[in-house]
Amino acid sequence: MRWLKLSLLALSLLAHTASAEPRSLEGTLKTGDLVFHTSRSRQSAAIQAATDSPLSHVGLVEVTAQGVFVVEAVQPVKRVPFARWKSRGVNGRILVLRPEQLPEPQREAAVVEAKRHLGKPYDWRFGWGDEAMYCSELARKAYSRAASVDYGKMERLGTLDVKRLGAALKERYSGQVPVDLELITPASLAADERLTVVHSDYPRIR
């Protein structure tokens, strides 16, 4: 009988320990969360230099019964499993921001809006038309159109540190850099204090 009581006590302690373990990052995500990381793409270093931030890519989370996904503007705009998206970032670091002041239906509507652009090409020239999309443009437009909230601040290309972008920028625009071009950057989105930090592997962000 004493052995039985000890066994039951041990099982109880194991169950308590298991329930006390923190959930995985994926388990804390909600539809509509904005996820940022340091991309390994060719232009990532230039974006980091121009914005003085390690954040060079952003996507929107979609939590479904089939798993957790990220809708992102790459080439082309696509929807990928969260684990794969996270693994593409430098050192696996990630920042998760949540628009907590918005009700769940509006966050879901933002993801639906983002998914309308699936299959569109990546916008290498950072224009504001809908024929092509870059990552932070997709995120900003999704919430602007679904919830009438504009996260981040639009900036003129000329106000960024374009000198650090070097010859690559001139090549992209055939020698004439459009300094008056307005765009939204991942760093600008991440700086919006209306977005709540859910998780961060970046010690100096916020």
Image: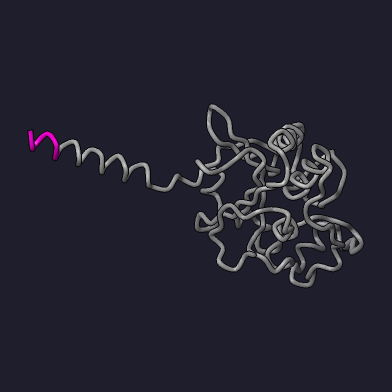
- Residue at 82% over, 49% down: 150
Q: Is residue 39 visible?
A: no
Q: Position of residue 59 (x, y in %)?
A: 66, 45
Q: Is residue 74 visible?
A: yes
Q: Nearer the viewer, residue 124 or 58?
A: 58
Task: Relative to 143, say whether 177 is above or below.
Answer: below
Q: Quarter of the image for the N terminus: give it.
A: top left
Task: Give the magenta range.
Answer: 1-6
Corner quadrant of residue 90: bottom right
- Does residue 28 appear left or right of residue 173 in this picture? left
- Does residue 58 appear left or right of residue 145 in this picture? left
Residue 4: within the magenta? yes
Q: Quarter of the image for the C terminus: give it.
A: bottom right
Q: Main secondary structure of the magenta part?
A: helix
Corner quadrant of residue 14: top left
- Residue at 33% over, 42% down: 18
Q: Nearer the viewer, residue 78 or 155?
A: 155
Pick out the residue farthest to the top: 65
- Residue at 22% over, 38% down: 11
